[in-house]
Image (tube, grey):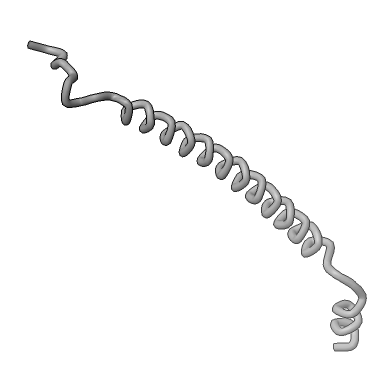
Amino acid sequence: MAKALLGHVGGYDPRVLAEMRRLQQRVQDLESELVRMQAENDALSAAARHHDSVFEDLDVKTAEPALT
C-alpha cells in the first residue's frame, strides 16, 4: 500500500500528461476551426445581403416576361 501511495504522490503518469497535451492541442485546433468557420459564415452572410440588395432595385411590375 505504501508503494501505491508513494507512486501516486511521486508525480503524474507520463501517459496522462501526453493525453492532456493531445487534448489541449485538439481544443486549440477546434477553436481555430471555429474562428475560420465564423469568418466564412460572416463573408457568406455579407455576400447574401449584397445579392438580395441587387434584386431589390429591380422593378418587377414593369419587367417583361422572359418567354412569350
Left or right relative to 29: residue 45: left
* Residue in the image at 53% along x and 40% along y: 42
Name the spot of residue 17 as percent of width and height, x first: 81, 62
| Quadrant of the rendering where the N terminus is positioned | bottom right
Percent across and percent down for residue 50 are 43, 31
56 left or right of 28? left
Along the line of sight, the residue nearer the viewer: 1 or 59: 59
Q: Position of residue 58 (x, y in %)?
A: 28, 24
Residue in view at x 63 percent, y 49 percent:
30
Residue at the farthest left position: 68
Q: Quadrant of the C terminus?
A: top left
Q: Is residue 64 left or right of residue 53?
A: left
- Residue extending farthest bottom: 1
Residue farthest to the top?
68
Q: Is residue 48 above or below residue 62?
A: below
**Residue 40: percent from the left, percent from the top?**
54, 37
Number of numbered callouts drawn: 0
Up/down of 66 relative to 59, above or below: above
**Quadrant in the picture for residue 55:** top left
The residue sitting at 85% across, 78% down in the picture is: 8
Residue at 68 percent across and 51 percent down: it is 26
Front residue (pair 2, 33): 33
Image side of residue 57 versus residue 2, left or right: left
Q: Nearer the viewer, residue 24 or 55?
A: 55
